[in-house]
């Protein structure tokens, strides 16, 4: 995956936390996931990517982080269902912001939401998975990006 593509996801993630959480998020350096590394947290959502790229974008976060974010969006309920919905919304927003930068050939699906940890994070046809750590209020979440350019785009 090109460095420029990862920068788009870094910026999209920063923009989300700047807008919703009034900043304060510290984004770590993206790194290549080790195949044996367990990267999923309490809630996860995945969005499929097709078009000029094929793959998936995940956002995964601990319950405590979601419960701290909910009041910032005006939500008073903090049960697991609402936390899971927020993870889906965050994933959709990050992917949608990336689509604005990458153009109409970067097509995104609706999010698929996991309440509880998914068993595994799948890569597109063996494409590498990059992990972007997101630290906010002493809670770490992750954006996972696994993309490969399609033959039509090459």
Image: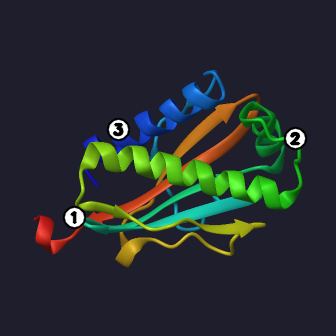
Q: Would you say residue 153 is visible in this rendering?
A: yes
Q: CA distance from mark 2 to mark 1?
A: 40 Å
Q: Is residue 26 at least partly visible in the picture?
A: no
Q: Nearer the viewer, mark 2 or mark 3?
A: 2
Q: Quick one: label 2 or label 3, which is nearer the N terminus?
A: 3
Q: Which disc, if any, is residue 4?
A: none
Q: Residue at x 72, y 36 (%)?
A: 73
Residue sitting at x 74%, y 31% = 72
Mark found first going from the N terminus, 2 or 1: 1
Q: In screen coordinates, is 93 left or right of 37? A: left
Which residue is at 76% across, 67% downward? 115
- Percent coordinates x, y for residue 21 in the rendering: 66, 28
Q: Where does label 2 land, which residue?
A: 76
| Percent position of residue 141, x then y | 66, 45
Residue ID for mark 1? 52
**Could you give the CA–CA distance between mark 1 and mark 3, rounded to whole angstroms?**
17 Å
Judging by the rendered image, the residue that carries numbered circle 3 is 7
Between marks 2 and 1 in the image, the one whose residue lies nearer the viewer = 2
Does 24 sit left or right of 1 as displayed?
right
Labelled pair 2, 1 in contact (Cβ < 8 Å): no
Q: Is residue 131 above or below residue 128?
A: above
Viewer-proximal residue among 28 and 96:
96
Task: Pick whichever, 7 or 75, lies toward us.
Answer: 75
Q: Quadrant of residue 16?
A: top right
Instruction: Please name the residue shown 14% across and 73% down the image.
Output: 151
């Amino acid at each position: 995956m090109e460095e420029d593509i990862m920068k788009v996801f870094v910026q999209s993630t920063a923009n989300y936390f700047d807008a919703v959480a009034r900043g304060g998020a510290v984004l770590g350096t993206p790194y290549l996931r080790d195949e044996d590394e367990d990267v999923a947290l309490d809630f996860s959502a995945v969005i499929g990517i097709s078009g000029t790229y094929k793959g998936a974008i995940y956002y995964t976060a601990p319950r405590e982080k979601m419960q701290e974010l909910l009041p910032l969006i005006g939500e008073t309920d903090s049960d697991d269902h609402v936390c899971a919905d927020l993870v889906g919304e965050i994933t959709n927003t990050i992917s949608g912001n990336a689509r604005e930068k990458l153009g109409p050939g970067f097509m995104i699906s609706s999010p698929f939401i996991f309440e509880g940890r998914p068993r595994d994070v799948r890569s597109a046809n063996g494409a590498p998975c990059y992990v972007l750590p997101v630290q906010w209020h002493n809670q770490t979440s992750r954006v996972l990006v696994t993309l490969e350019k399609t033959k039509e785009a090459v």
